[in-house]
Amino acid sequence: MSGGTKRKKVFGRCGEPAEEQLMRAYALLELVTPLAVDCGNICGRACCRGDGHTGMGLFPYEEQLLKGEPDFSILSTEDNEGYGLCVCQGMCRRSVRPLACRMFPYFPLVYENKRTGAWGIRVIPDPRGSSVCPLIRQKVPPQPLFERRLRRAARHMLREPKLREYLLQTSRFLMDIEAIRRKLEQS
Ligand code: SF4
Ligand code: SF4
């Protein structure tokens, strides 16, 4: 059974709003890549080397979705807002890769516009990957299509409480990392 088929089955059976929003985010980021060219040629696919213990943070509901996939194991952690980490051996079927891999090396930073009460979304290089990814270190922006898709994926997730909370908490965490980095640069 292909990963795509399995995913449809999981979502189709449950049909809950949370899974629908997650599935839309998956679909939006299925084929688009961060750059218009293959950035893996720049670094030798540094983010997909898979050492068997470094993991990508799973979003809410992904653990149930990916459980049993032979390409991954899932580690429990107190980091990542209590959600698990997806650990691989450096290869996976693209159709089943988790959201963090689809977004990497960017993240949709979510904030509330205090004046209007609306959600703002800013696509940023994810500072957690700066030791691995040259696009982050060199502040290379994503191609516009990727940025648009990532924003749309985030808008879908904002409609669901657990996904929204995860995006907000992670956004705060990334802003804290950025604030610390700036302080260190100034000192
Ligand atoms: S580490 Fe960065 S540049 Fe290299 S393949 Fe991954 S996303 Fe692309
Ligand atoms: S799960 Fe797949 S996309 Fe994600 S790091 Fe591993 S090999 Fe790369």
Image: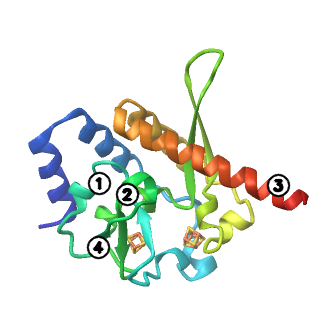
Task: For the residues labelled 2 and 1, say whether their Cβ atoms are less than 8 Å apart.
Answer: yes
Alpha carbons under labels 2 and 3: distance apart: 29 Å
Which residue is at 19% across, 54% downward? 7
Structural crowding at the residue carrying mark 2, measured as other residues with C-alpha within 10 Å and reported as few (<14), some (14–19) or many (≥20): many
Q: Residue 165: x, y in percent?
A: 43, 38
Alpha carbons under labels 4 and 2: distance apart: 12 Å
Identified by mark 4, the residue type is Phe
- Circle number at residue 62: 1
| Residue most extreme to the top | 116
Which residue is at 64% across, 60% downward? 127
On the question of residue 46 being in view, the answer is yes
Within the image, what quadrant is residue 182 found in?
bottom right
Structural crowding at the residue carrying mark 4, measured as other residues with C-alpha within 10 Å and reported as few (<14), some (14–19) or many (≥20): many
Give the residue pinned by disc 2.
Answer: 58
Alpha carbons under labels 2 and 1: distance apart: 6 Å
Q: Nearer the viewer, mark 3 or mark 1?
A: 3
Which is more toward the observer, 86 or 35?
Answer: 86
Earlier residue among tags 4 and 1: 1
Say which element carries label 3: helix
Alpha carbons under labels 3 and 1: distance apart: 35 Å
State left or right for residue 33 relative to residue 3. right
Give the residue pinned by disc 3.
Answer: 183
Q: Is residue 92 above or below residue 167?
A: below
Say which element carries label 2: loop
Task: For the residues labelled 2 and 3, say whether their Cβ atoms are less than 8 Å apart.
Answer: no
Which residue is at 56% across, 44% downward? 171
Identified by mark 3, the residue type is Lys
Earlier residue among tags 4 and 2: 2
- Circle number at residue 72: 4
